[in-house]
Every structure is written in C-alpha cells, then in structure tokens.
Image: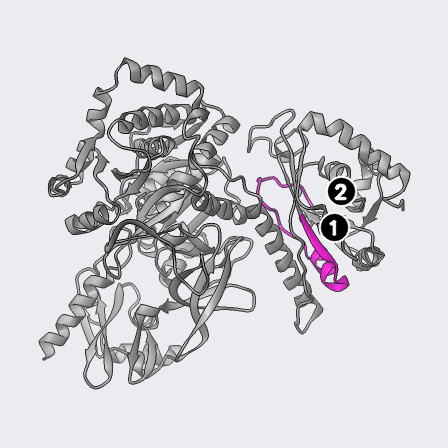
Amino acid sequence: MKNPNDLGPRLVRAFFRLILRPLFRVELSGDAGEFANERTLIVANHESFLDGVLLGGFLPVGAVFVVHSQVMDKWYFRWVLQLVPHLAVDSTSPLAMKVICRLVETGVPVVIFPEGRLTITGSLMKVYDGAAFVAAKTGATVVPVRIEGAGRSYFGRLAGVYPLQLLPKIRIMIQPRRHIPMPQLPSAKMRRRRAGELMRRILLDMLVATRPRRTFFQAFLDAKSTFGSGYKLVEDVRLKEESYGSLLRMALGLGRLMAADTRPGEMVGVMTPNAAPTLGLVLGLSATGRVPAMLNYTAGVEGLRAACTVAQISNIVTSRAFLEKARLTHLVEKLSGIKVHYLEDLKARVGLSDKLWILWHKVFPGSLASGQQPDDAAIVLFTSGSEGRPKGVVHSHNSLLSNVAQIRAIADFNPLDKFMIALPVFHSFGMTSGIVLPLVSGCKAFLYPSPLHYRIIPELVYDRNCTVLFGTSTFLGNYGKFAHPYDFGRLRYVVAGAEKLSDEVRRLWIEKFGIRVLEGYGVTECAPVIAVNVPMACRIGSVGQIAPGMQYELEPVPGIEDAGVLHVAGPNVMKGYLLYDKPGVIQPPKSIHDGWYSTGDIVHVDQDDFIHIRGRVKRFAKIAGEMISLEVVERIAAAASPGFIHAASTRVDAAKGEALVLFTTDPALKREQLQAAAKSAGAPELAVPRVIQVLEEIPLLGTGKTDYVQLKKMAEETTAAAA
C-alpha cells in the first residue's frame, strides 16, 4: 500500500484539484487543525462516485481510503484506485475490522464512508457499525466531513428524484472532531450496535450544522432555482396546482399591496385557511420584510384579542369568502382598532405601477429582502392556550429552516412525496410541514382547510396520491375509523404529534392498513420538532430520539424517579416570547442556561436515547404527598374503557390537597373497572379517580389537543357543587 505522503500520491491529489476545482467550483471550508491527531478516522456522507476523488484531492492531509472489495471488480475503479493509497476489504469477513484497526493505529489518516453506498434519497442512508467500532476500539479521533452538491451531478444516483446538473457547485465542509468512547455494555454485539448509533448521530449532527444560513425567502428562491419555475408544488381544494413561478407571482403581488399599508418589521396578522394563497401571503410578507403572525381563528374573540395585543397587530389579512363559509365574520367585527384587509379587495387594487414592480422582481427576485438576516424575526405563532392565555412565539428565519434541516436529516422526505396537510397552518406542526418544508425542499403538498372532515380526508389521500400524512392521535383515529382499507395504500409516513398516540389508534392503523404510525414530540417554541420516531430509529411507546443538532438536560423533580423536566437547546429554539404584560417585546427563553428552553414536560431517556414522556409538570397531581401523573390516569381509563375518549383533571381537596376528576365519553364506566385496570398496569391506587363525569364530547382546541383549561374549570365546579 502506498504512503499517502509520498511524492506520487501528492502529485495525484494536485492533479485532481487542478481538474475538479474549475469544473465544479469546489469550495473547501473548515479547520485543517482538526486532522492533527495521533489517530484520525475521517468519515463522510456518500453522495456520488466522485466523493473519494474529491476528498483525496481537497482534504488538507493525505489519507488511505477504505473501499469494499467488490468495487475492485470494476475496471475504471481499479484504474483510479491504483493512483491513490487504499485498502480493499470484504465487509463480511470477521478479519476486515481488525485490518482497518491496525491501519488506523499506524497513525495514517483513514477515510471511511459509513453508509457503505451512495444515497438514493438525498438523505442519510443506513449507517453501518464497522467504522464506529473501529473508532471506539482504537480510540481514534473522528473528523466528520460533509460533501454537498455532488449527488446532484450525473455521478450520483438521484436521477428521477432531483433535477441533475452537468457541473453542480460542490462544497466540502470539515467539522469539529468528535470521539466515540467504547460503550460499557455486556456483549460485543451490543457495544458494536451502540457505537454505530453514536456514529449515526455524528453524521446527523453534521448535516444540520452544515445547513446554509439564509432567510425563508432566499431558501424559497434557491429551491425555485433547483426545481424550475414550472415545477408543480402545491395543490388545494380548488384542485389547481401552483408552481414555484405562480407562487412567486402571488407572493410578489400580495407583498407589494400589503407593503403600502404596513411598515418593515411590522407583525401582520394572517387569518386564512390552508390554501395556496396563504402560502403566497406568508411568503410575500416575509419577502417584503414584514413578519406574518398566524392567528388561531378557532380561539374565539378573546383569544384573538389577546393575540393581537401581545404582538401589537394593527393589520389583519383574511378572506371574506373564508369568513363567511366558516361562519367567522363576527370575529373580525369585534376586533376594534384593527384594520382588516380582504384578499378579494386587494386584487382590485393592483395598478400599472404594481404590475411593473411585480414583473421586475419576478425577473430579479433576489433584490427583495436583501437587508434581512437569518436571525431576524420571520414568523409569529401562538401557543394553543391549553394551559392559560396564549403567548406569541417569535421564530427567526434560522430557527424555522433549522427545524426543516433536522427533519430532512432523519426522515427521507423527497420531491417524489406528497404531503396531506390538514392540520391548520396557524399550528406550528402545520406551519413547518405545510408551508416551510414544501416551499424550500420541493416536496409537494395538498392543503385541506379542516382536519375534522374525517370521511373526506382519507378519500383525498387516496385520490391525490399522498404519501405522507401528519395528524394528532385523535384525528388519525377518526381517519382510520372511516377510511377504506385501500385509501392509505400509498402512504410511506404517518406521523402523530401534538398529543400522545393512543395504543388503540396504533393498533387500528397496523391491523387495518398495515401502517406503523410514527410518534413524535414537539413544542411551538422549537418550531416544533424536538424528537420523532423514524423507520431507521423507532421504539414503540417513545417519541423518538432528540433531533440532530439539539442538546438536552433533565432537571430532577422531587417525588419522581428516573425522569426529570426536559430542557433543550438548539438552532430551532425560538427567539423569544411575546407576553401580554409586555406587548411587542421579545423576551428570550429562560432556562437552566442562556438560550435554553424548558419544555415543562417530565421525560425519561432510556439507554438508547429514546425519549419517553411521563407528563407535563402542570399535569401532575400531588395527592397525599405522592406525585400522580394525569397521563397515567388517562392511560388507566383507556385500558378500562377502550373505544371511548378520556381526560383527567384535578380539583382542590381539603383532606389530600388535590383530587382527581376523570372526564369520559363512556356512560357505563365505573370505578371498579378503573381499579382493575390500574392493578393490571401496576399503577398505585391513588391514580384511580373517585369522581367520574360523563360528557358527550371531550372539549378540544382547534389544533386537536384536549382543552384542559375548560376541563379544569369544570373540575373546579365539582368542588363548588360538593361544598
């Protein structure tokens, strides 16, 4: 094997640089000092057949490449590899890892592609354990290197998924060094598997850390440049597909017209349904330097007034037809001191100067929003108000796009997918998956105005060939109940969030449709995804592993063992809150460290880093000195009475401090059934409510979450009645 620092290999590397740099405009970034280690293992994502040549030519150190012995069967690979130092190994041989370990221990930098094959999705493929075990066994320093752009060339395998380019720009990004300690587990198989998972985390973190830093509008323009103006992207109930070009035209028109009545940096209320014009409006406001504030039109008059107060909203954009169909006209009529702009009226205001402005910026859109920075405020969302008065959550361009990068790193969504977006876009889940992700990634979307049409949505999923469905457990349960077994035949991903996924819904989907529902976890303040199960890393009963690029800490809670309050940090965390007592003032999150956010959720993290939600701090009752999770109470009720809806709350109790109140839609549910279910589950007797109230329907918020504020009031009324 050749020494990579000999004259011959150095001349070969110089030749590769000379040829590839002008052709692909190769850009190298990162610190060459990351390679100054006693033992170095260089790991990279695998985009194309050019990857080895790129790393060999542009890395600031000479290295030996580990290649699969099957590669040597191809004459052209044999010809190239004879020019560079390499080690051919058979991955099925038990001796292969020992040979690589000995090579690493010589001190020569070694390059391995842990995926073992080229990506065919644009996302990370399966990560093999071998490279990670070598790093752990030898104590080598791991240097991650990101290759970006090569997959879009004709040397990759993304044809038919992404548009290919003859000579795309290629970036090579060196990341800070990492280490993989040998896991302290009882068997070699378990140690190897755990090390492989740690290597996968390193590569995922690398993908997020190397994301482009840009504004929402710039990201949209980049996607438009990639896919072309005519690329059909969004469809709604009109069954008319909008392309990147038509969305840009729509955004320019709406942005131009609203700019006349608003000022740069102003928070402008948006009260429109899931439809293509909503995407155009949000994009147009963002392009012209305004901040869209997504109003929850299901929150009632008081909720809207509170939202307008905290964000100092003086202008709202809505649709007269939408208000009339949804019977919401009375809401805007009661919002005094706020100017309401109707989309139907804006169209009539377009004059010649506006048309010329739109035409100019359609040709040269990059001149818009040139003064915006990635860390500027991009959008305002409002908390659901499930535990009190809603707060404004301000996200920057960077936090929104970071969450999209995190999602795309762990889930292989691609332009061949089509999302069914029925969750309202004023909800963070709907906003990220229904507006930001499609607009910047080329993934198609079908927008539907209400998640409550349980019979219609499954039919549309079937008719419009959707492959991805997002929903709450409640919504997914109802879709599954009314759907034909073949309606969901093309779905690749079904993701549940916003509330705990019930075992009954999980079973329904696997038995009726053969689909595993993937449960995730997020909060509005994190844009929203914090963790999610994906096919490559899934554990039933958990909400998945924490998103790449995020850190977490658990704060102990007295009375609760092996769990704590989850605090998180990462690029997707909000800029801050807008609160009722200080309208218009962005207040950064306060937690155990600067820039961290306390979720208020009590979680357990298992040995494989899967997060298990135990409940919210505010959703624990202290009964006779014991901490009782209301989530556990609801699970007991679900086990005792499957097929019905249950929700737990608390009321004041003079003797025990607090008492449980169970609300249920099951008129026949008795305490004896709850006691039997609690005993089977190993739950304490204190978790069995003595007060059971039957309701025709459990009250829900517009996002599909249980309205615990209303239930708390109802529970307190039982205290007053008992007195």
Q: Classify mark 1: helix, strand or loop.
A: helix
- The Cα–Cα distance between marks 1 and 2, rounded to whole angstroms, is 8 Å
Classify residue 443 as left or right of residue 108. Answer: left
Q: Please give left or right for residue 609 compared with residue 457 in the image.
A: right
Q: Give the residue type at disc 2.
A: Pro
When asked about the image quadrant of residue 25, the answer is top right
Q: Looking at the image, which residue is at 25% across and 56% down?
A: 385
Residue 60, label in figure: 2
Which residue is more in the foreground, 520 or 549?
Answer: 549
Residue 38 on image: x %, y %: 79, 58
Q: Earlier in the sequence, mark 1 or mark 2?
A: 1
Relative image position of residue 375 (x, y in whole percent): 44, 43
Q: Say which mark, if any, is on residue 35.
A: 1
Q: Is residue 470 above or below residue 196?
A: above
Q: Which residues are magenta?
A: 117-144
Disc 2, SS: loop
The image position of residue 513, as x and y in percent, is 42, 51
Q: Does residue 157 show up?
A: no
Q: Image quarter for residue 589?
A: bottom left
Relative depth, front residue between 246 and 691 = 246
Mark 1 touching mark 2, by CB under 8 A?
yes
Instruction: Determine the image quadrant of residue 119.
Output: top right
Q: Is residue 594 visible?
A: yes
Q: Quadrant of the C terminus?
A: bottom left
Q: Judge left or right: residue 364 versus residue 238.
A: right
Residues 489 and 298: in front is 298
